[in-house]
Amino acid sequence: MVLPWHETSRQWVPRSQRDNTGNGEVVTERVVLAYSGGLDTSVAIGWIARETGAEVIACAVDVGQDGEDLDVIRKRALACGAVEAEVADARDEFADGYCLPALKADALYMDRYPLVSALSRPVIVKHLADAARKHNAGIVAHGCTGKGNDQVRFEVGIGALAPDLRCIAPVRDYAMTRDKAIEFAEENNIPIDVTKKSPYSIDQNVWGRAVETGFLEDIWNGPIEDVYAYTSDPGADQQAEEVIISFDRGTPVAIDGRSVTMLEAIVELNRRAGAHGIGRIDLVEDRLVGIKSREVYEAPGAMALIAAHQELINVTAERELARFAGGVRQRWSELVYDGLWFSPLRRALDGCIEEVNAHATGDIRMTLHGGRAVVTGRRSDESLYDFNLATYDTGYTFDQSLAKGFVDLWGLPTKLSARRDLEKNG
Ligand code: ARG
């Protein structure tokens, strides 16, 4: 028999187990579980109850994963033995509070991955912490393994928002392997179809989709078409399509002249850029835990928005600021990838990123075709591009006579060191 954890380790007896009523009454511990509605977290409800003796509250967060109806998920959690089930529509919150800062930073981990899963964890964590407070739970549980980044993001996030909560992960901490989970589901009549299991491990939200495992673990194997769900085959014959995205200080505010919210902008571009196979990424990436892993992503809306936004920054940001922003962008992406969304450094970098975006107001025109979103035009009242300075036609205002002295002084250190080396080496 497995003892409830509070009997095996007094040190971890949570507040609610000791006496949170003030009158000596002992209350059953409660666990809030990050619930997806899939096999693993459905089994985890019963598994956690068995391992810990606690009551399980399932908490599902909609970040635009576009799957089943939230009410179906809620009912399944209850049918699987949850004492309560919370479902939260966090789509706008995710788009405005997490995807938008990533867009303003043009955040791409290892220059390629738009942080799809990494961005969703902090918003899920926020809802888990709120649910724990609401239901007087002392523990938060998640379905991650011990090999990935997501365990770090969940637990470091909980530590930042609710340091008094404890975290558990049944797959990692209570040896809930896939085979045992299927066995448990069958033995306990858990209402979930275990045969429906996809060969891949998939995580998706409105910012994109991440697919790993299965035959993709051999990094010589190319992804096949059925790995993808957000994008069509970029090689398939398609008419090129034009789109104009308007930004206000880095925030997309209109597409082809129609105003949009951040969420609407992503959804529309997922559809339109996705139809041209834009935003497919096949990456062997460095996980925080030290492993290199192969992940296939598709993020059509995110990649189209980033391409447009980057271009607007190119024409509106002063040169030194734009150059410095490159380092900020990389550091920001690494912090968020590494589970440090709730960190003072991320907030500090956001301050710099706001400055970079201060003049990013205007329109970007792009052609969507054959897997690529190509910028073909830019227009901004705050552009630093000066036609009269740049033109080679007669009438330019750039004073070329200034260049001669500039070039001499700019090259002076090179000349001095070259002369020294020549004298020394002959
Ligand atoms: N490797 C990506 C990351 O750490 C995605 C992980 C998401 N999980 C998955 N089952 N594909 O952000």
Image (spheres, grey):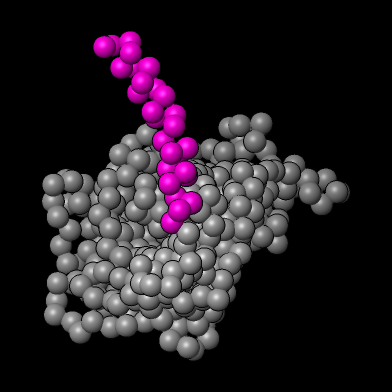
- In the image, residue 205 above or below residue 14: below
Q: Quadrant of the C terminus?
A: top left
Residue drawn at x 43%, y 39% as measured from the top left: 408
- In the image, residue 201 above or below residue 254: above
Q: Where is residue 92 drawn, in percent x and y?
A: 56, 73
Q: Where is residue 409 drawn, in percent x and y?
A: 47, 37
Q: Is residue 98 visible?
A: no
Residue bounds of the magenta highlight: 400-426
Classify residue 191 as left or right of residue 371. right
Please name whichever residue, 426 or 115, is drawn nearer the observer in this view of the structure. 426
Residue drawn at x 38%, y 41% as measured from the top left: 287
Q: Where is residue 84 drawn, in percent x and y?
A: 59, 66
Reply yes or no: does residue 417 show up in magenta.
Answer: yes
Residue drawn at x 28%, y 76% as measured from the top left: 368
Q: How many marks?
A: 0
Q: Predominant secondary structure in magenta? A: helix
Q: Quadrant of residue 261?
A: bottom right
Q: Is residue 280 visible?
A: yes
Classify residue 218 as left or right of residue 44. left
Residue placed furthest toward the bottom: 258
Q: Where is residue 299 drawn, in percent x and y?
A: 35, 65
Please name whichever residue, 331 or 385, is drawn nearer the observer in this view of the structure. 385
Q: Quadrant of residue 175?
A: top left
- In the image, residue 407 above or below residue 373: above
Please name whichever residue, 413 or 48, is drawn nearer the observer in this view of the structure. 413
Residue drawn at x 20%, y 72% as measured from the top left: 370
Reply yes or no: does residue 235 show up in magenta.
Answer: no
Residue placed furthest toward the right: 23
